[in-house]
Image (spheres, rainbow, N blue to C red):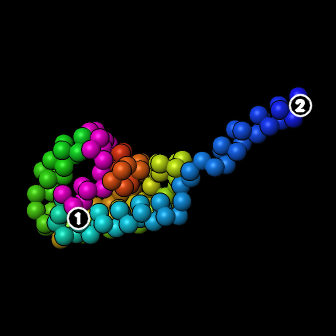
Amino acid sequence: MSFKLFAISLVPIVVACTSPVFTSADNAAIRFGMQQQEEAWNRGDIPGFMAAYADSICFIGMAVRTCGKALVTARYEKRYPDRESMGRLDFDQVEILGAGADHAWCTGTWRLLRTSDTLSGGFSLFWMRTPEGWRILRDHTY
């Protein structure tokens, strides 16, 4: 009887040990997505920049919360109507922490160099694994 109880008690441990985890390949995929965003932005390609976002993205800025990929895209297009206003984007101090097998937090800093000024701040992005790959579900940029 005690052997059965012991064997049953091991089931949750075995399941936990075989559950999928966030891997170095996942980390690399998110870093690649961040790199693609930088490159798209620096080409003046807002749709390319938006490719990393999930359809249900919510962007939370200092004064606004915008949800839905179409609305977030429209906000970027209104705020950055041309290549000059977009400047050059650089991400730095990027840290990625897995939050289970299918989610991750990514934090870091951003800098936007433009002819007229330089803007900078920080971000925290909540990434989600989707059938299309890793996508940003929440973007808190400040």
Q: Secondary structure at mark 1?
A: helix
Residue at image mark 1: 41
Q: Is residue 107 left or right of residue 140?
A: right
Residue 12, position in %: x, y? Answer: 69, 38
Query: Against 6, is 100 above or below?
Result: below
Q: Residue furthest top?
A: 1
Category of crowding for the residue at label 2, using alpha-carbon neighbours closer than 10 angstroms: few (below 14), some (14–19), many (at least 20): few
Residue 58 quadrant: top left
Q: Give the magenta-colored segment's residue range.
A: 47-67
Q: What residue is at 72 percent from the left and 42 percent from the top?
A: 13
Residue 66 quadrant: top left
Q: Is residue 94 left or right of residue 85?
A: right
Whether residue 78 is visible here, answered yes or no, is yes
Q: What residue is at 41 percent from the left and 60 percent from the top?
A: 30
Q: Quadrant of the N terminus?
A: top right
Which of 107/117 is in front?
107
Residue at image mark 2: 2
Residue 123, position in %: x, y? Answer: 39, 53
Residue 81, position in %: x, y? Answer: 10, 57
Distance of label 2 from label 1 (alpha carbons): 63 Å
Name the amino acid type tagged 2. Answer: Ser
Which of 50/29 is in front?
29
Name the amino acid type tagged 1. Answer: Trp
Residue 94 quadrant: bottom left
Whether residue 64 is visible here, answered yes or no, is no
The answer to whether residue 114 is magenta is no
Q: Secondary structure at mark 2?
A: helix
Query: Against 74, is 38 above or below?
Result: below
- Please say if the residues under marks 2 and 1 sit with CB atoms less than 8 Å apart: no
Residue 110, position in %: x, y? Answer: 35, 62
Q: What residue is at 47 percent from the left and 48 percent from the top?
A: 102
Which of 31/14 is in front?
14
